[in-house]
Image: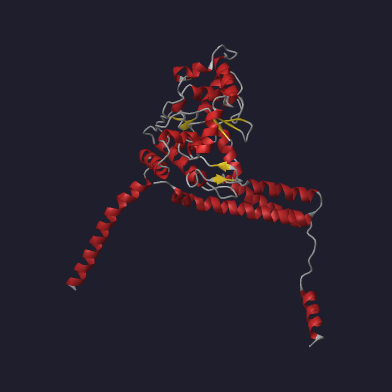
Amino acid sequence: MKTRTSILLGSLSAALVALALTSPRVVAADKVDPVADAKAFQNFFFQKFPNVKHEDFVNGPYSMNEDMKRQWQEKEEFPPYEFALDAGKEMFATPFKNGKTYADCFPNGGIGIRQNYPYFDEREGKVVTLELALNRCREANGEAPYSYVKDEMASLTAYMAFTSRGKPMDIKIPDDPRALAAFENGKRYFYTRRGQMNFSCAGCHVQSPGERIRAETLAPALGILNAMPIYRSEWSGMGTTSRRFVTCNSQTRAVPLEPQADEYRDVEYFLSYVANGLPISGPGARP
Amino acid sequence: MKRSLPLAMLLALSLAPAARAANEADYKAAYAAAEAASKEAAGMRNQWTVTVSTLAAAKKAADGGDFDRAVAAAQEAEALAKASIFQATSEKDAWKAMEIR
């Protein structure tokens, strides 16, 4: 009887020890760790494409295909986004009706700050993108907001990105559970399959960069937003980050969310953070 | 034996429910079911474009008086909406399998 009791007690203690040893791991696996996520994300691409220079990932499909890269480099002598860039510069300097300008709304007069967007606004408890900040600036100065998906917004962000060219993406995640939740929500959105085609963002831009989907060469997810906004030949015009998300959703036959929906803001936060250290290359040009 | 086959066929046909054309009530019931599933999918932020267009096709067919086509489209829309609900539900956890770690 005593032997049986001691075996029972021994088994129970062993089970408790095992539980105690495994529990912290479970907690650790569920903990949001943006630093570890960014490291793993970057390493995945660096190992998958060992011949691509790290700073070259921001050039999207051109980093995956030498022929395309040469064509793009020639096109860059007279880039198709140049008109938008000039328009954006002029718009940025033109005062609102109240005499103020965009420069009054941003740190450093809005010059060379693209790499810090999106940021987490601790007062609002949400992610604020550059596009959102620009429209809020307009509204605060009595102007009507612009469409988030093209034309004026693309021109303004093109100019602001241009003033940050070469600067490393520098997104901060404050020690705030809401910021961590936004990062995690963005990550979830990025990996979640949606639409009748059952595609996630990752399905194309993690599993298949460099591969073709119909006539297009897929860009790697790493640094994919560093080139925004972009001139796309397919669109015959400029498009913002919002436009890119909306179009991606439509292509998977998912009804897109409204531009600057929380999910889009969060996925922009996630994708920008994991690209920290890679240079801003926007405005970009894509096929 | 030769006579029994046509007789059996005749009997089977007479017992089979007669196929009838769909009417407006059938369409309304099918459309309501599809619309409810579609709203549920939209509430999950996972509406599919094809659900919306198929629902619209059902309505258009009904407006033109073609209730057979309207019912078929509404049933297809309901199936699509239910598939999107299934997707959203299963992806609540399934996305983690895709994550780079």
- Res. A51 in view: yes
> What percent of the width, then of the height, locates residue A179?
42, 35
Of residues A270 and A203, the one drawn nearer to the viewer in this rendering? A203
Which quarter of the image is occupied by the N terminus of chain A? bottom left
The C terminus of chain A lies in which quarter of the figure?
top right
Asked whether, in this view, residue B78 is left or right of residue B23, the answer is left
Q: For residue B13, what is the image quadrant? A: bottom right
Q: Residue furthest left?
A: A2
Q: Residue at x 63, y 49 (%)?
A: B38
Seen at 41% across and 38% down, the residue is A180
Residue A264 in sight here: no
Residue furthest top as drawn: A99
Residue A20 placement (x, y as % from top left):
27, 54
In the displayed orientation, state which residue is furthest to the bottom: B1
Q: Is residue A180 above or below residue A26?
A: above
- Residue placed most toward the observer, A185 or A285: A285
Residue B92 rendering spot, x and y as whole percentages: 49, 50
Q: At 57% across and 19% down in the image, what residue appears?
A: A86
* A103 to the left or right of B65: left
Figure disc tally: 0
Residue A256 vertical position relative to residue B78 in the rendered view, above or below? above
Colour pattern of the rendering: secondary structure
| Residue A127 falls left or right of residue A80 | left
Residue B87 image position (x, y, % from top left): 55, 52
